[in-house]
Image (cartoon, coloured by chain):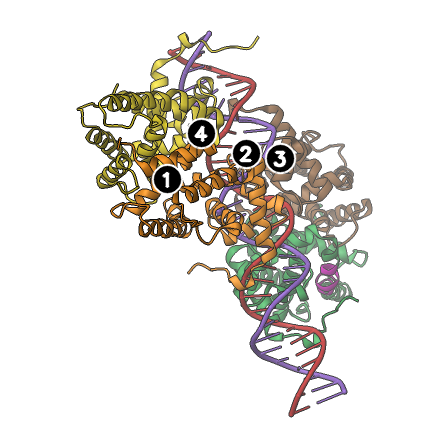
Chain colours: A green, B brown, C orange, D yellow, E red, F purple
Amino acid sequence: MTAVPDPNRRNDAARRAILSTAIDLVGEVGYAKLTIQGIARAAGVGKQTIYRWWSSKGSLLFDAFLAFAGDGEAAALPDTGDLAADLKLVLRATVDELDDPRYDQAMRAMHVEIVNDHLLAAEYVLRLDQPMRELKRTRLRAAQRAGQLADDVELDVAIDMLFGPVLNRWLQRTGPLTHDYVDQVVDTALRGLQPR
Amino acid sequence: MTAVPDPNRRNDAARRAILSTAIDLVGEVGYAKLTIQGIARAAGVGKQTIYRWWSSKGSLLFDAFLAFAGDGEAAALPDTGDLAADLKLVLRATVDELDDPRYDQAMRAMHVEIVNDHLLAAEYVLRLDQPMRELKRTRLRAAQRAGQLADDVELDVAIDMLFGPVLNRWLQRTGPLTHDYVDQVVDTALRGLQPR
Amino acid sequence: MTAVPDPNRRNDAARRAILSTAIDLVGEVGYAKLTIQGIARAAGVGKQTIYRWWSSKGSLLFDAFLAFAGDGEAAALPDTGDLAADLKLVLRATVDELDDPRYDQAMRAMHVEIVNDHLLAAEYVLRLDQPMRELKRTRLRAAQRAGQLADDVELDVAIDMLFGPVLNRWLQRTGPLTHDYVDQVVDTALRGLQPR
Amino acid sequence: MTAVPDPNRRNDAARRAILSTAIDLVGEVGYAKLTIQGIARAAGVGKQTIYRWWSSKGSLLFDAFLAFAGDGEAAALPDTGDLAADLKLVLRATVDELDDPRYDQAMRAMHVEIVNDHLLAAEYVLRLDQPMRELKRTRLRAAQRAGQLADDVELDVAIDMLFGPVLNRWLQRTGPLTHDYVDQVVDTALRGLQPR
DNA sequence: TCGTAATCGAGACGGTACGTCTTGTCTTAGC
DNA sequence: GCTAAGACAAGACGTACCGTCTCGATTACGA
């Protein structure tokens, strides 16, 4: 009989210490030098306490990122009636967040884990990507109703085209992440590449 | 003064063995379990021979990926006169390549290294992203001249919007990478999201 | 402040396995090919477990030798009343012990470490040489009381002259280590080199 | 056809540089950190040049020690007619030599090699111990003829008893190596331990 | 109110990779 | 044709971290 830890018994102070220490530490030393041992030491926690509650460094980082980023997460995208302005607002905010080294490093770490771990990727899609995507879909549907977005546009493709380039430029550092850039992306995506 | 190894003395057989073994091994065991020690062992090579010529696992993976992927690289994007068709052809080919586990794993490994290493990212931009981007720019410029692309479109933004979503969906596994998907991306990007 | 391992936590089975494996291994492969890695492997023990408890190969060999040789160590030299006979008995026993390859190799290994390590030499003197020397001194003092040894003889010099030649011949292999030889040493040392 | 190095072709400058560098280096860094690589580097010589002419670090050290110590070696022991005085003179000189760190370290290194290498030990006995021993035998035989040494004393045993204790005390650092100590050894050995 | 059982911090354990070093052999230029 | 220089395969060095384990001490539950 395998002993399953009882979440009720869980020491919440330790849990929170671990999650916030993970974020702080990845911000300090970067993903490559982030170790479970180091997190335990810095959090003043036994290694076993981490292994008891998380199955891998990735899932710990995932939870840590959720706790860190999720706190200030908006429940919905702004809707002022001006789709382009609203999208630019959201994307500029994203760019600004990524300027914080802790946010930047934490998100990089989480992405690295996702790239190499199918299960974690599935969890990411389910718990982070899907909810965010639903918020975006809602905003875009409203735009369709308002006649600002073509009716036959596949919303997921639209989302990928609006948010994908920014995420990509950040991950691969192929260019500077500026407000100008996101404005251009929004304008170009909405208007299209062909002459009209 | 650090002793710099003399490239003339380099054993090319060992170099090639290391690069191809790295690709094979990352395809077998995945990035997380890829070790320099393991590559050396599998390549029948001393560890020092790897450390002598590469400064990090990342730069080795980078070279390995270049040697592996670069061989079959096209010198230019196709230009049949039909921009949409040409782009779809290229993106479908990319999607097909990523179906090969060796290619998939090797590219994931390289991207992970890039995400966490500024210098490697710079080298990636210089040696892989920029040349590829130049080929794409050339094709898009031709399309502009042919009146298939608006004159005021920023080409880099256009490239990000065409190729970014595919790369993203692959890296994050946010959805299936199909020919249909890339077709939709191309069509939507060209036409734009707004009604017309 | 360096973290000092807590001896209470020490796994005694591992400790004993390491010590006895060290003796066995040095007996098999000799000092020159004795490696900490090899001892760990043969003892079924992690390398760190050796490094945690011993600061050098020398101090491990020293402990191993103590555990191996110390077990059968006599608490006192025999005293039958006949000094020459007693000394010959002890020296012949020493010679016989050195015939065992494990004893021979282990003792050689320890001596090599001592020759090149001041601190280890000091520990050797304190923990092995001094106690043994005290036993010998006690026996010689008894002989002085019995009128078999001159009163003005410096006991340490006497000990060096009785036991030194045997140890030397063994270490340097300058000649065969026989019972005859030790008998001659004892007789000559007692009687002196000058005519009488 | 195996290439046998032709001694005539031997570059004597390189040979001398290697031998003297070996002595200098062992004096600086000690035996434990003495490497063939290090000697080659310090001597400005290719590694192969060392491997070509010496089969092991031990035999190199042996030659180096011979070249270093042998130069100032007396052809015979002094014979003033006073055996005790002559022996003390020789032993005091030995003690003084061992005060030189280069001599000390070089001799320790050679002894370590001898302890673990049968062949080298045989060569040591043949080329160093035997000749020295013959000089000592000659002096002792003269003493026998002069009536200062008992006729029935085995000369090799006498030599071991006179020189062994000093060598031993030096190798094992069991006590300080002083002129007083060697004087006591000589006096005690000549007179014997028994009362007379 | 008191066991008793799970959690906690701590850290030893068997493994294994790290990046460096040395070994003894082999290769390449240069004198 | 030997030299110096140094690349090569091999493998040990001592350190770090992995994930499991064992240890008392603490804590919270249910009897």
Q: Amino acid at mark 2?
A: Gln
- The CA distance from mark 2 to mark 3 is 9 Å
Q: Which quarter of the picture shows residue D21? A: top left
Q: Amino acid at mark 4?
A: Arg
- Let me know if marks 3 and 4 both belong to one chain: no
Q: Residues within 10 Å of mark 2 (few under 14, many from 20)?
A: few
Q: Chain of mark 2?
A: B
Q: Amino acid at mark 1?
A: Leu
Secondary structure, mark 1, is helix
Residue under label 2: B48
Q: What residue do we see at 39% from left, 40% from top?
A: C163
Q: Nearer the viewer, residue A24 or B139?
A: A24
Q: Measured from the top left, where is residue C138 in percent x and y?
A: 37, 52
Instruction: Determine the main secondary structure of the stretch shown in magenta.
Output: helix
Q: Is residue D24 left or right of residue C70?
A: left
Q: Measured from the top left, where is residue B172 in percent x and y?
A: 71, 53
Q: Is residue A131 magenta?
A: yes
Q: Which residues are magenta?
A: A123-133
Q: Amino acid at mark 3?
A: Ala
**Residue D180 in sight:** yes
Q: Are marks 4 and 2 in contact (CB under 8 Å)?
A: no
Residue under label 4: C173
- The CA distance from mark 1 to mark 2 is 53 Å
Secondary structure, mark 3, is helix
Q: Nearer the viewer, mark 3 or mark 1?
A: 1
